[in-house]
Amino acid sequence: DIQMTQSPSSVSASVGDRVTITCRASQGISISLAWYQQKPGKAPNLLIYTASTLQTGVPSRFSGSGSGTDFTLTINSLQPEDFATYYCQQANSLPFTFGGGTKVEIK
Amino acid sequence: QVQLQQSGPGLVKPSQTLSLTCAISGDSVSSNGAAWNWIRQSPSRGLEWLGRTYYRSNWYYDYAVSVKSRITINPDASKNQFSLQLNSVTPEDTAVYFCARDPEYALSIFDSWGQGTLVTVSS
């Protein structure tokens, strides 16, 4: 199985800050990488797929980059509704696997 | 807009079978593009993909090795839904279970999710 490692596991930030989350795959996955946002008690919500394609309806302050084994999710100008946990997921091969999550907390 | 509505019991006894159903609106379980997945989430295991079914002139199934001997995913085209059965459950199967749509088989992403069902395995 492909292991997905996210860092940091948590980050404290203020409204208006830029936040960067990284995700590393245990083997190359090309650009087959998705990012999700999850709020407490809710299902994950797709933000980005194929590493950098913004899902319809997702604000443009979210962006993704990377290929191969190293990927980044950037949130520009953090908004109050962005405080949540973020997960990466590799879509390259079965079984699909997720990172351990990064919790974005209010500083 | 695709909506997935989950149903099923929240408490299952050890060694028994966990059964959940996911009703689909806004798409078809028999769609030639989509795949229909079950994913669970627990503090100890995080988000774990369990399996999927999809239709491409025939029905196909993929399962995670970790549950392959115990899992069945069944599509029901007449009711436009799909189900999860997990046999011989133990407390380690306690988790929130989600159904999710992959809109395009080649993408292998999850763009619509059910509301989640907390299933507790306990006597």
Image (cartoon, coloured by chain):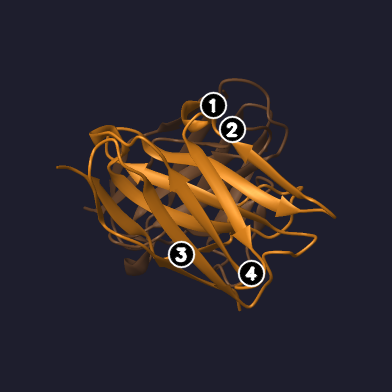
Residue farthest to the right? B57
Q: Where residue B32 sits: x, y (%)?
A: 80, 61
The span from disc 3 to disc 4 (Cα, nearest Å) is 19 Å
Which residue bears the numbered disc 2? Answer: A95
Which residue bears the numbered disc 1? Answer: B65
Q: Are discs 1 and 2 less than 8 Å apart at CB?
A: yes
* Pair 1/2: label in front: 1
The front one of B121 and B103 is: B121
* Pair 3/1: label in front: 1
B24 to B119, vertically: above or below? below
Q: Are marks 1 and 2 on the same chain?
A: no
**Mark 4: few/some/many CA within 10 Å (<14, 14-19, 20+):** few
Amino acid type, residue under disc 1 in the picture: Val
Residue visible at 64% across and 32% down?
A94
Residue B114's tag is 3
* Pair 4/2: label in front: 2
Which residue bears the numbered disc 4? Answer: A56
Q: Where residue B42 sits: x, y (%)?
A: 31, 41
| Chain whose colour in the figure is orange | B
Residue visible at 28% across and 51% down?
B119
The span from disc 4 to disc 1 (Cα, nearest Å) is 33 Å
